[in-house]
């Protein structure tokens, strides 16, 4: 079974939320781009929720995402997987990304959104027990997967659920941004 590795995180140090997938699929790995499969709804959802046009060139979409203080990464650093589906990941091969360092470098992140259930399950099992406070207390929210394999919801239903991401960004902006664990 081939071993695959995720991309580096897309983030500025002032990020306040983070979107985590599980591991890029084959189309994304071949294109060297997050969510490159043409039927993946990720970029269309971000256009609806954050106003980032999916027609922009990929580097510009990433810049707009960072301007909105949103980080993007994957839970898994490496794993053995045949194909693109999360269900094909060999559980014993999972090596998560280094979130202790990531959260130390991004102290304003207060909410993590998971793009689907696999990302959340692996994070809770493999990452959360390794984190110390205040990173351990980051709010964790699961959103429906944007994958074309997750066909149980319409685009409109996914858009409604992913709207929570925009609302959290608005809440953060209205309340001001503080480091985790800060009383100020």
Image: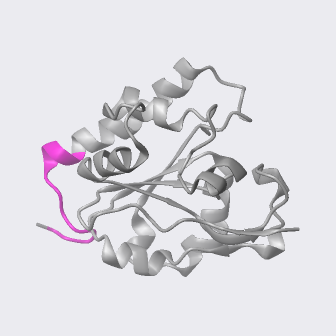
Image height of 112 relative to 126, above or below: above
Which residue is at 17% across, 57% downward? 177
Task: List x then y, in percent, for residue 116.
Answer: 62, 45
Name the quarter where the C terminus is drawn: bottom left
Task: List x then y, in percent, for residue 178.
Answer: 18, 63
Position of residue 115 in the picture relative to residue 100 (left or right): right
Numbered marks: total: 0
Which residue is at 58% across, 76% downward? 129
- 176 in magenta: yes
Task: List x then y, in percent, for residue 47.
Answer: 39, 30
Dominant SS of magenta comes to loop
Residue 13, located in which quarter of the rendered image? Answer: bottom left
Image height of 109 relative to 105, above or below: above
Res. 142 visible in picture: yes
**Boundaries of the magenta span:** 172-183
Query: Which residue is at the front of the view, 160 or 71?
Result: 71
Image height of 123 relative to 99, above or below: above
Name the quarter where the N terminus is drawn: bottom right
Which residue is at 72% across, 27% downward? 151
Query: Which residue is at the front of the view, 142 or 133?
Result: 142
């Amino acid at each position: 079974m081939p071993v695959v590795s995720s991309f580096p995180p897309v983030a500025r140090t002032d990020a306040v939320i983070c979107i985590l997938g599980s591991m890029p699929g084959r189309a994304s790995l071949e294109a060297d781009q997050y969510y490159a499969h043409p039927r993946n709804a990720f970029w269309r959802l971000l256009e609806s929720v954050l106003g980032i046009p999916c027609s922009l060139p990929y580097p510009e979409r990433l810049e707009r995402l960072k301007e909105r203080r949103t980080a993007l990464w994957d839970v898994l650093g490496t794993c053995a997987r045949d194909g693109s589906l999360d269900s094909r990941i060999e559980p014993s091969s999972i090596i998560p990304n280094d979130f202790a360092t990531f959260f130390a470098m991004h102290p304003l992140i207060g909410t993590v959104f998971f793009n689907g259930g696999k990302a959340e399950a692996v994070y809770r099992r493999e990452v959360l027990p390794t984190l110390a406070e205040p990173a351990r207390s980051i709010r964790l929210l699961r959103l429906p997967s944007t994958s074309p394999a997750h066909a149980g919801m319409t685009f409109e239903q996914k858009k409604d659920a992913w709207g929570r991401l925009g609302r959290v960004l608005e809440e953060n902006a209205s309340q001001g941004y503080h480091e985790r664990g800060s009383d100020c």
